[in-house]
Amino acid sequence: LGCGVIHEGVLERCNLQAKRGWAFGLGLERLAMVLFSIPDIRLFWTDDPRFHDQFKSGDIVKFQPYSKYPPVFKDIAFWIPDQHFEENDFFELARSVAGDLVEQIELIDKFTHPKTHRTSCCYRVTYRSMDRSLTNEEINDLQNTLRDRTVSDLLVELR
């Protein structure tokens, strides 16, 4: 909230020299920051869809922070076993290996071999930190651990 006395010259130009007045602004951005739990006023001027896509007309939602650091993408492909394969088990395994560094996991390809009838799945794992850039060495180590654990825990065959 900003406010102050209207400058006398402004009043004189409006033929209101005998009057005194106050000017103030509400600071709608500040009100929106409180309403939506937005931590930094500069976010209102970003072109980042990760900010704008969180808000829809008529909905009051809490702002979900996102990282300013770049993502690292790694793919893992494997033949799923003949017995039951539960995709959520793979998601939980990835998060148990890399924790909060796993931002997203998506199935990018699914293929069933026409002769063997085996099914292969390829997942893209997006790694990203909220507070630092990730190194290739760090992510390669995590990805190798994920590959090893996927084989041992889920009984799949890597491609």
Image (spheres, rainbow, N blue to C red):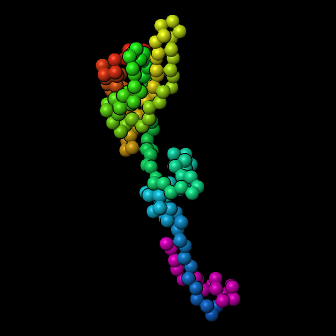
- The x, y position of residue 44, in whole percent, is 53, 56
Please state the extent of the stretch shown in magenta in the rendering. 1-16
Residue 36 visible, this orientation: yes
In the image, taking residue 71 as reference, residue 5 lies left or right, namely right
In the image, taking residue 92 as reference, residue 119 lies left or right, namely right
In the rendered image, which quarter is residue 91 located in?
top left
Write the residue at 45% across / 54% down. 62
In the rendered image, which quarter is residue 14 located in?
bottom right
In the rendered image, which quarter is residue 49 located in?
top right
Write the residue at 64% across / 85% down. 11
In the image, 133 versus 152, the foreground residue is: 152
In the image, taking residue 91 as reference, residue 58 lies left or right, namely right
Tell me, yes or no, whether the highlighted magenta stretch contains residue 8: yes
In the image, taking residue 83 as reference, residue 33 lies left or right, namely right
In the image, 29 versus 96, the foreground residue is: 96
Q: Quadrant of the C terminus?
A: top left
Residue 98 visible, this orientation: no
Write the residue at 41% across / 27% down. 87
- The x, y position of residue 47, in whole percent, is 56, 48
- The x, y position of residue 142, in whole percent, is 33, 28
Identity of the residue furthest to the front in this view: 84
Identity of the residue furthest to the bottom in this view: 18
In the image, 46 versus 122, the foreground residue is: 122
- The x, y position of residue 158, in whole percent, is 39, 16
Tell me, yes or no, whether the highlighted magenta stretch contains residue 124: no
> Compared to 22, does 139 lie above or below?
above
In the image, 114 versus 159, the foreground residue is: 114
Number of numbered discs on residues: 0
